[in-house]
Image (cartoon, rainbow, N blue to C red):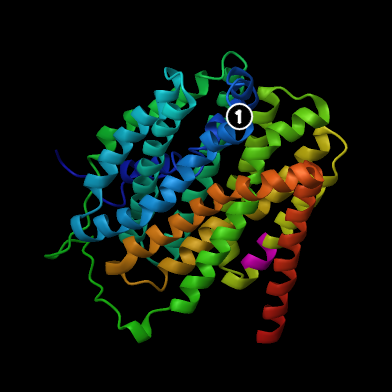
Amino acid sequence: MRQAKTDSFLVKATLLVTSTLTIMAGATIAPSLPAMREHFASVANVDYWVRLVLTFPALCIAIGAPFAGLIIDRFGRKPLLSIAVVVYGLAGSSGFVLNSLGVILVGRALLGLSVAGIMTTATTLIADYYIGATRAQFLGFQAAFMGLGGVIFLTVGGFVADISWRMPFLIYLVALVLLPFILLLPEPSRTGNSSTQLKDTPPEPSDFPWVLLVLTYGIAFVTQVVFYMIPVQLPFYLQQLGNANASQSGLAIALCTLFNSATAFGYQGIKARLSFINIYAIAFLFMGIGYMIIGFAPAYGIVLVGLAVGGFGLGLLMPNLNVCLTSVIPAVSRGRVLGGLTTCFFLGQFISPIISQPLSQSVGLGTAYGLAGGLMLVLAVMTFGVMTRWK
């Protein structure tokens, strides 16, 4: 089977479509949560267990991503990506036929491990294939396609969840269609004179950007804790606010990801004018304002405004995190470093309901969103302060 060239439309399309499987993998079934809770109402602590069905993949991604990074740095990118896509389709769709929350969680665990491999490998391949402004632009496109995947999966998931809470699980089968195209991707050569050869040498420990790495990982973790309050808690919040059904919840969450995508598409143009820290400050500001609007919204329509504003900020974050790291990390360490970033993303998603559920039970969902917005505004003020000091 002949491999495609890295600058071909086929390679670019395969990487972008494969990336849509990642960030919203857990949230695809978010509109089903209220109906799933009713179906398993006899299970003790069902509220926690149902939310865990949504977020448990994130914990497994967080655990699996560092190992995925080690594997692809040592054995190559494509073998793991191919296996992960197959597991994604089979494990993700298993909830359609399973009748126990415990067994469903096993399928969700395998889904999470597959996403760890897909996300780490897809982002690493982009960094392998492209450099400079081209890489920044493509990582922006990647974040945008992740958001578009969320729009499609969540919208479809919301509508089919009105038929049955099981139906959204079938959406994961789309991954199997991608396997033939993934097999055509070029494997970056670790020896020889390939155009995709990994030429960097390992950096000395004293030269490695540890401070930047820790700050980037911290930003990824905190922002994902805040972001995942939307798919985890919003269906319940909208149900309280205006008795919204599953399709309305799916459309609302999809709106956030739509604005996320629109911003990410324009990331390269924004990055050409602003520094990484400028972009972080703007992202925190819009997320803070958006979540404050959600928290104080009196009706469904105002929540949509908050989701749009917050989505604008979210769209800046992912490409900024990836471009910031890949611009300074040597190729031979790329898989491990991006695996660590994936861990921070999804550990934040897993921790999110552990923090937000007791908080919302104590002060209410609206106040919880308001507090999350306040946290992001504090980060925005701190970041603007750093910018002023550096001028």
Q: Which residue is drawn at 59% across and 23% down?
A: 36
Asked whether 162 falls inside the magenta stretch, the response is no
Query: Residue at horizontal 55%, vertical 43%?
Result: 147
Asked whether 156 or 199 is in front, the reply is 156
> Viewed as shown, does residue 302 lie left or right of 330?
right
- Against 268, residue 100 (above or below) is above
- In the rendered picture of this protein, how many numbered marks are placed on residues? 1
Looking at the picture, how far across and down is residue 64, in whole percent?
36, 50
View extreme (front): residue: 44
Q: Can residue 76 be seen in this view?
A: yes
State whether residue 283 is above or below residue 41: below
Q: Mark 1 points at which residue?
A: 46
Viewer-side residue, 186 vs 90: 90
Q: In the rendered view, does 290 fall on the left or right side of 74?
A: right
Range covered by the magenta-colored residues: 279-283
Q: Where is residue 367 in the image (x, y as percent from the top left)?
A: 81, 48
* Picture residue at 50% right of the left edge, 53% below the top: 347
Q: What residue type is labelled 1?
A: Val
Name the image quarter holding residue 335.
bottom left
50 left or right, relative to 181:
right
